Image (tube, helix red, strand yellow):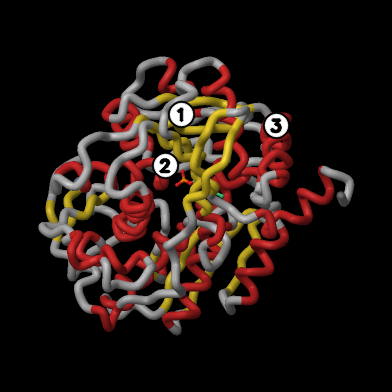
Amino acid sequence: MLVCQACFRTFEESQPLWRCTCGDLLALRLPGMFALGDLARRDRNIWRYHEALGVPSSDNRVTLGEGGTPLLAANIDGAAVSLKLDYLCPTGSYKDRGSAVGVSKLKEWGITEFVEDSSGNAGASMAAYAAAAGMKAAIFVPASASGGKLAQIGLYGADLRRIPGTREDTAAAAWEAAQSGFYASHNWSPYFLAGLKTLAYEIAEQLRWSAPDWVVTPCGNGGLLAGLHQGFRDLMQAGITKSMPRLAAAQAQRCDPIFRAWQNGLDHIPTAEKQETAAEGISCAKPVRGREIIAALRDSNGVVETVSEEAIWKWVEQMGRLGCYIEPTSATAPAAASALIGRGVIPRDANVVVVLTGNGLKASDKIAAHFGGA
Ligand SMILES: *Cc1c(COP(=O)(O)O)cnc(C)c1O
Ligand SMILES: [Zn+2]
């Protein structure tokens, strides 16, 4: 069942919808949960958790092998952490978890053409899954998006529309186009969000069905944070794990609406003014899942940390020195973890997972320009 988060109206899952008739976000409510005993003989991709994903028939499930990414032991400023290498997903970002489920649901609904807008990674991911499912996708992205992401979208065969101006201008152009096609926005889709819960399931499974003390992650529109929160909630409700990790949301100082709202104790997130940031994937002046972000932070006793452009580039380099090539957006997480450990907010002996969300190969143009081609 789909439930509106604002007016609580309910809808059948057989109805192709991306939001409520009142205009607000829909949440997916499922009766079941996977049984741990069955997992041993299932494949290492997100569909091993299919009972929690809302695509009942395996005929409709589209996969490129997303999920099953390593949890790597490393250290940040001398403190032991685990790095969740989600930049190793098929299209180079964690968004594949959401796209796999979102596009599978479109397939179930009989939809063959859709419109999506993104800062780059979700567009590349949705384009790849459209290709895998034999669908036509029109992907709207800011003209300034990283070259690798644009090349990917074109190569997967999608209709790439580069929009001059801000991320918000891109959303407006997609919205316009969606008047005559299905708007499959990853930021709105309750199925895309369901796919993101698998990040929490997987982390817990890799920790032998326990929850870490902290999870540090970049936060833009909030899908990733909301998905992690719901995933860990599901596990607790099913009696699989006992605690909710504290969630730390990383933002760029140059675009920090969540930080401002959190500091001021607000229930929603007002639009913030923003400047250009290297963290293009989380450059959202008005997060779509604002209310959910605040709720997830409150429920998990979380924190929001902002990082400077300097710190972002420093952590692109530091992660590189550990053998992890990540894009600048992704570097906000280790940068925030470093600051939080440094101030003692995260204790040095805590069990910390830092999510590395996007592959550096997508942004090699910008990384090479920054480090002088080195
Ligand atoms: C999309 C994205 C994020 C942030 O995700 P939200 O769900 O919008 O908060 C973080 N890192 C990378 C690399 C991304 O592409
Ligand atoms: Zn509603």
Residue at coordinates 35% horizontally, 20% vertically from top-left?
A: 266
Assess disc 3: are there few (<14), some (14-19) or many (≥20) residues with their C-alpha within 10 Å of its C-alpha: some
C-alpha separation, residue under disc 1 versus residue under disc 3: 17 Å
Q: Is residue 310 above or below residue 178?
A: above
Q: Which mark is residue 258?
A: 1
> Where does label 3 land, which residue?
309
Assess disc 1: are there few (<14), some (14-19) or many (≥20) residues with their C-alpha within 10 Å of its C-alpha: many
C-alpha separation, residue under disc 1 versus residue under disc 2: 9 Å
Q: Position of residue 63 (x, y in %)?
A: 40, 74
Residue at coordinates 46% horizontally, 75% vertically from top-left?
A: 130
- The amino acid type of the residue labelled 1 equals Ile
Q: Is residue 301 left or right of residue 309?
A: left
Element under disc 2: loop
C-alpha separation, residue under disc 3 versus residue under disc 2: 21 Å
- The amino acid type of the residue labelled 2 equals Gly
The residue lying toward the viewer, choosing from 94 and 348, is 348
Q: Earlier in the sequence, mark 3 or mark 2?
A: 2
Q: Position of residue 373 (x, y in %)?
A: 87, 51
> Where does label 2 land, which residue?
222
- The amino acid type of the residue labelled 3 equals Glu
Q: Is residue 257 above or below residue 103?
A: above
- Contact between marks 1 and 3 (CB within 8 A): the answer is no
Q: For ligand 1, tell me if the residue under mark 2 lies within 8 Å.
A: yes
- Contact between marks 1 and 2 (CB within 8 A): the answer is yes
Q: Earlier in the sequence, mark 1 or mark 2?
A: 2
Assess disc 2: are there few (<14), some (14-19) or many (≥20) residues with their C-alpha within 10 Å of its C-alpha: many
The residue lying toward the viewer, choosing from 170 and 145, is 145
Q: Position of residue 275 (x, y in %)?
A: 66, 32
**Position of the N terminus by quadrant:** bottom left
